[in-house]
Image: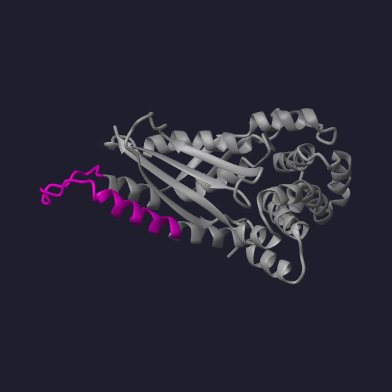
Amino acid sequence: MTRDRAVNTVVDVAFALFALSVAVVLLSTVNLSEPDQPDPFEPDRTATVLGTSTFDVSYSVAPVLEDATASSEEIDEDPEEYRSERTAHASMATHVKTAALGSLAVGDEQITPTGQQYESAIDSRVQTVLANTQFETSVTARWSPYPDASVTGSATVGAEPPPDVDLRTTTLTVPSGVQPTRRAAVEAVADGGDYATVAELVAEATVDGFLPVVESKHALERDDSTMALTRYRYERFAAVLDDADRETVREEIEQDDVETDDANEYLAASLAERLVDELRRSFDSPEAAARSVSTGDITLIVRTWDQ
């Protein structure tokens, strides 16, 4: 079993429990005076659908491929020559979590729009899954390496709640698939580490989570749309970091000598330079900063309201 598959299994189980907790909360608002004739579209049924249903999502990365081929001198194929259609099969939790991580942004600048393409496709599919229920539903996934970080990923699918509506909200934290680093940060600070130590650990986990070393190396050694998209992610990650140089990254990911370890290490060092100042401003001590690290978690929020 691969690590990603194992993580997805954990997320699916956690989200099933999440659905149960939503059902418990929402059942308190349901009139149970006629137990022999239950409404087939009670809110608990909506929560169960969210937690247990798996479905395919088909989407296109054609717009991203156009940007990739236009911005990189190393990608000389016409974007129309690449396969741009994608299909993913997963639970609701995994779909939304993946879209959130795929929409990673540094400050106000998103690295690539791939996550947005995926999120839009999920949203359309969710609207079909939840059709004819008597409750509107919104599902959001949010990831950040620590509270109020400038590096974030988020995705929201479902309906948009109107103002002044009575919302019922349930929140759960589940594994993100990014390397957990809180324990390592706390131990490192206890051994004399400082804000820079925490920033380095967080940056390494973030870069490796967005650009897994082994998978990225294999992708860059191919000659298809996966290669083009992966190269684009590396170059864009460098572009959104003030202290990174795109040419340095390009040299590390040349097809004839791909060194994703070195590329990731370079990006992580540049990202850490940004994060260390942020941690100093946000936390009173390196110990507090270390305890706040949450790279291994992602927050799922389900909101429901009457139509």
Residue 206 x %, y %: 69, 52
The magenta region covers 14-42
- The colour scheme used to paint the residues is one colour
Residue 213 x %, y %: 74, 55
Q: Quadrant of the C terminus?
A: top left
What is the quadrant of residue 226 in the picture? top right
Residue plotted at (69% across, 59% down): 285
Residue plotted at (25% across, 42% down): 41
Residue plotted at (67% across, 55% down): 284
What is the quadrant of residue 294 in the picture? bottom right
Residue 115 visible from this viewpoint: yes
Residue 91 visible from this viewpoint: no
Seen from the viewer's position, the closer of residues 227 and 142 is 142
Q: Quadrant of the N terminus?
A: bottom right
Residue plotted at (73% across, 53% down): 203
Residue 19 x %, y %: 37, 53
Seen from the viewer's position, the closer of residues 300 and 226 is 300
Q: Is residue 43 one of those drawn in magenta? A: no
What is the quadrant of residue 7 in the picture? bottom right
Q: Is residue 21 one of those drawn in magenta? A: yes
Residue 140 x %, y %: 48, 42
| Residue farthest to the front, as pictured | 284
Residue 22 in the figure: left or right of residue 80: left
Tally the marks: 0
